[in-house]
Image: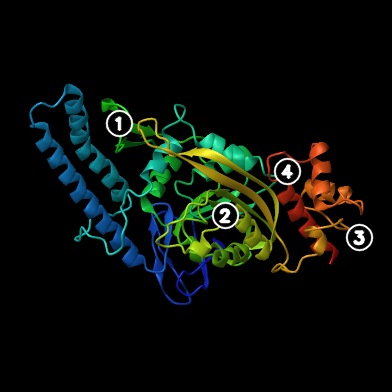
C-alpha cells in the first residue's frame, strides 16, 4: 500500500495497492472511484469524462484513417502516375487498416474502444506524440536522439546523486525513467505522470516484456519506400524494477506535499503550464526540503496559450527558479536535434537547457547582497557543522578570499578545472553563492 497519493478531487490521502492489476481505488473521504487501466491508475478528477474523450478520439481516428484509405485508392486509378508515386500511395493505403488495428489493439487491452461521437469535445488526436514513441523505442541506432539527450542531463548531475523517490512530470513514453534507472540509480522508486494515453499504453506493453508493432507514416517521406514503415518497438533495457506509470495531471499532481526526493521535468515547463512562474511552487510543494529538481527541455511556447510576458528565456528561468526557493547548482544550454526521423525530410534543432537544482528551506528571500552584482565577495562565516549537498559548494566557498568578485571566483574555478567552460559557469557560481549566503544568514 502507498500513502504518497491524494484524491484528485478532494486531496484527501488515497491508498493505492499498485500491485493489484485492474483494481479500482476509492477515496474514503469523498467516495470517488478511480480505475486501473491494466497496470496504470487513472488519477484524474473526471474519470468518466476522460474515458469518453479517449473513446471519441479513437472514433475520430478510425474515421480519419478510413477516409485516407479511400482517398488513396481513388488517387491510384489516376493515369500518368510514376512507378515511384504508385509505390508510395499503395504502401500507405495498404498500411492504413493494419495501422488502425495496431492502435485499437492497445486500447482494447484496457477495455476501451471507439465511442459514439467522432468529434471529441476537446481538440487533440489520439495520435498526439506518436513520433516520440518511435524516437524513444525504434529509431536507434540509425538515429539516436535519446542517448545524447540523457548524457546532457547527466553531465550537470553530481557524481554521487541518489534519486530516491522520484516524480516525473509529463513523462511521455517514460523513456527517461528507463534511462534514470539503468544509467543513474537502479534503486530509485520512479513515478511517471502523463495524461496522454497512447505513449503510456505502448510503454505498458514494453514494461511487460512484449514488443509493439506500429506503422510510422511520415507526412514528408525522404523516399517513396519510406512512406509507410512497420516499426517493431522493443524495451531499451531490462524493465526498471520500481517504475510506476500514472495517468495524472502534472499541473495538479495528486501526491502528498513533501513526499518526493527528486522531481524531473522533461520537456514540460514550456509546453504544459501557461505560466512557469505559477507552476514552480507546485514543484517545490511535492519536494522534501533539500530535494533535487532535474530539468531538461527547450523554451518553445504556444503563442495561443502563453502570453508574451510568460515566454521565458534561460536567464528568466534561472531567476524564477531562485525566486521560488531553488539553488541552481549546475546547468547546460546547448543545441540538439529534435524529432529528426530517419524516414522524414523534416526535423528541427532546439536549444535545450539541462539543470540540477536543490530546494532550499522555504521560499527564497528575494533581497540579494550587492556583492552578487558588483564588488568583492566578503568572507562568509559558515557554521562549522554545515553539510553541503554538492562538492562544488565547498569549492566555491574555498575560492572566497575577500578580494575576488563573482567573475574572478568563476575564473579561478575554471582555471582549476572545477567548472566546465560551457558559458554557464558564472550562473553556477552565483547559484552556489546564494545558497552559501542563505546558510550564513
Mark in the foreground, 2 or 1: 2
Q: Are marks 2 and 4 in contact (CB under 8 Å)?
A: no
Mark in the foreground, 4 or 3: 3
Which residue was labeled with disc 1?
229
Residue 387 visible in the snapshot: yes
Q: Residue at x 8, y 32 (%)?
A: 78
Q: Disc 1 or 4, which lies upstream in sequence?
A: 4
Mark 1 and mark 4: span between their CA atoms?
A: 42 Å
Mark in the foreground, 3 or 1: 3
- Residue 190 is situated, as x and y percent measured from the top left of the image, at 56, 51
Mark 2 and mark 4: span between their CA atoms?
A: 30 Å
- Residue 232 is situated, as x and y percent measured from the top left of the image, at 36, 32
Tag on residue 313? 2
Quadrant assignment, res 41: bottom left
Q: Residue at x 76, y 50 (%)?
A: 429
Residue closer to the observer: 148 or 12: 148
Residue closer to the observer: 180 or 67: 67
Circle 4 Cα neighbour tier, 10 Å, few/some/many (<14 / 14–19 / ≥20): few
Circle 1 Cα neighbour tier, 10 Å, few/some/many (<14 / 14–19 / ≥20): some
Residue 186 visible in the snapshot: no
Amino acid at each position: 500500500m502507498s500513502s504518497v497519493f491524494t484524491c484528485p478531487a478532494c486531496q484527501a490521502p488515497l491508498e493505492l495497492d499498485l500491485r493489484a492489476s485492474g483494481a479500482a481505488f476509492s477515496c474514503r473521504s469523498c467516495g470517488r472511484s478511480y480505475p486501473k487501466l491494466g497496470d496504470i491508475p487513472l488519477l484524474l478528477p473526471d474519470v468518466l469524462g476522460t474515458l469518453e474523450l479517449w473513446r471519441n478520439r479513437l472514433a475520430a481516428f478510425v474515421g480519419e484513417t478510413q477516409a485516407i484509405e479511400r482517398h488513396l485508392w481513388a488517387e491510384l486509378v489516376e493515369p500518368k502516375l510514376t512507378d515511384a508515386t504508385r509505390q508510395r500511395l499503395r504502401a500507405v493505403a495498404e498500411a492504413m487498416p493494419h495501422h488502425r488495428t495496431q492502435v485499437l489493439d492497445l486500447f482494447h487491452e484496457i477495455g476501451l474502444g471507439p465511442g459514439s461521437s467522432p468529434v471529441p469535445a476537446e481538440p487533440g488526436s489520439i495520435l498526439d506524440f506518436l513520433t516520440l514513441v518511435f524516437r524513444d523505442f525504434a529509431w536507434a541506432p540509425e538515429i539516436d536522439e535519446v542517448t545524447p539527450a540523457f548524457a546532457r542531463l547527466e553531465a550537470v548531475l553530481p557524481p554521487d546523486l541518489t534519486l530516491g523517490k522520484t516524480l516525473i512530470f509529463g513523462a511521455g513514453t517514460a523513456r527517461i525513467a528507463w534511462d534514470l534507472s539503468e544509467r543513474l540509480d537502479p534503486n530509485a522508486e520512479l513515478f511517471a505522470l502523463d495524461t496522454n494515453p497512447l505513449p503510456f499504453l505502448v510503454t505498458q506493453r514494453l514494461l511487460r516484456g512484449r514488443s509493439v508493432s506500429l506503422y510510422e507514416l511520415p507526412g514528408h517521406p525522404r523516399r517513396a519506400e519510406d512512406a509507410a514503415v512497420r516499426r517493431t518497438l522493443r524495451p531499451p533495457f531490462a524493465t526498471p524494477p520500481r517504475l510506476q506509470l500514472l495517468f495524472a495531471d502534472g499541473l495538479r499532481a495528486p501526491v502528498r506535499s513533501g513526499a518526493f526526493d527528486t522531481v524531473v521535468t522533461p520537456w514540460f515547463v514550456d509546453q504544459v503550464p501557461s505560466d512557469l512562474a505559477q507552476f514552480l511552487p507546485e514543484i517545490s510543494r511535492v519536494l522534501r526540503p533539500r530535494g533535487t529538481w532535474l530539468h531538461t527541455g527547450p523554451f518553445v511556447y504556444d503563442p495561443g496559450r502563453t502570453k508574451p510576458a510568460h515566454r521565458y528565456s534561460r536567464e528568466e528561468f534561472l531567476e524564477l527558479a531562485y525566486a521560488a526557493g531553488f539553488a541552481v547548482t549546475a546547468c547546460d544550454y546547448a543545441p540538439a536535434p529534435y524529432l529528426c526521423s530517419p524516414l522524414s525530410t523534416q526535423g528541427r534543432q532546439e536549444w535545450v537547457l539541462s539543470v540540477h537544482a536543490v530546494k532550499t528551506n522555504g521560499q527564497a528571500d528575494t533581497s540579494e547582497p550587492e556583492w552578487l552584482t558588483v564588488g568583492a565577495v566578503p568572507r562568509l562565516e559558515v557554521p562549522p557543522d554545515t553539510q553541503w549537498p554538492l562538492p562544488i559548494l565547498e569549492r566555491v566557498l574555498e575560492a572566497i578570499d575577500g578580494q575576488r568578485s563573482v567573475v574572478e571566483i568563476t575564473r579561478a574555478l575554471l582555471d582549476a578545472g572545477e567548472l566546465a567552460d560551457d558559458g554557464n559557469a558564472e550562473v553556477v557560481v552565483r547559484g552556489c553563492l546564494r545558497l552559501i549566503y542563505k546558510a550564513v544568514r
